[in-house]
Image (cartoon, helix red, strand yellow):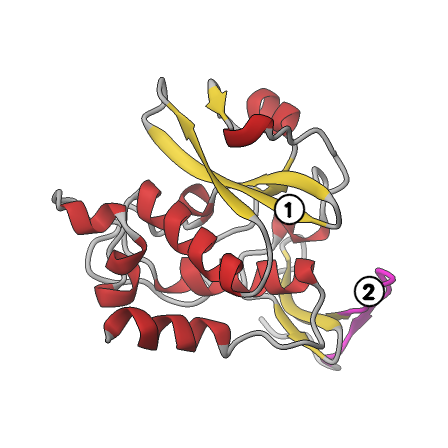
Amino acid sequence: DEYNLGMAKALSLVDDTMTDLQKAIVIHDYVCSKAIYPTDEKDIYHSAYGFFKDYKIVCAGYALVYSAILKEIGIPCRYVISNSMEHAWNAVYINGKWYNADLTWDDTTFTTTGKNSMGTYCHIYFLKSTADFEANKGHSDSTFPDNIECTDTSFDDAFWDSLTSNIYVYNGDYYYLDLDAENFYINLIKRDVNANTTRLNTANYQ
């Protein structure tokens, strides 16, 4: 059915050569690149099935489909709410620690109805501490299940914060487009797991 076919597609994007962090990034980008935030109201939009049916989901759907996919690949991912914000996002367990991830707010096309496109989203709200979420990211009144706490700040200033392109993973390395805004150049970057970066394009693309 649509759910199983959609899940299979999502799972096909990751493999055992990737770390849990890399898998979480790839699935984040997949959901953000496909999801459409609807302007009308239906119960299905609040479910993971809404994504697999026609990609239309509200914040609850973003959080539930991300949880569902990550669960299938063995990454703990839980549903977080804020009653005062009337909003939902995820807590994701990476390398023994929990982090906040708000795919709705990372999807910069979430107010667009009827279309979405690859690359039109960001990673600003991906794997952040609650302190950063509340002080710098506009979140408040967070309610976590099972006394989960997102206290680690390792990714509060991560390399992906400025990226609005897909982040691809191949043979353990990251590949992405990085905009040199000062010179208005687009660079293709390879980044290894030790944070060494290499510019792959030999010309400046404007």
Decide: is 117 above or below 140: below
Left/right of residue 156 with respect to residue 105 in the rendered view: right
Decide: is 96 above or below 136: below
Left/right of residue 102 with respect to residue 184 in the rendered view: left
Identify residue for label 1: 93
State the residue at coordinates (28%, 56%).
36
Identify residue for label 2: 193
Q: Nearer the viewer, residue 159 or 187?
A: 159
Q: Which amino acid does the dot numbered 2 rest on?
A: Val
State the residue at coordinates (87%, 62%).
194
Residue 189 in sight from this viewpoint: no
Q: Position of residue 200 (x, y in %)?
A: 75, 79
Quick one: quadrant of the N terminus?
A: bottom left
Quick one: quadrant of the C terminus?
A: bottom right
Q: Position of residue 89 (x, y in %)?
A: 44, 39
* Label 2: which secondary element: loop
Q: Position of residue 141 (x, y in %)?
A: 47, 18
Q: Nearer the viewer, residue 42 or 195?
A: 42
Q: Which amino acid does the dot numbered 1 rest on?
A: Tyr
The residues colored magenta run: 191-201
Residue 3 in sight from this viewpoint: yes
Label 2 environment density (alpha carbons within 10 Å; few <14, some 14–19, many ≥20): few
* Label 1: which secondary element: strand
State the separation of the CA atoms marked 2 and 1. 19 Å
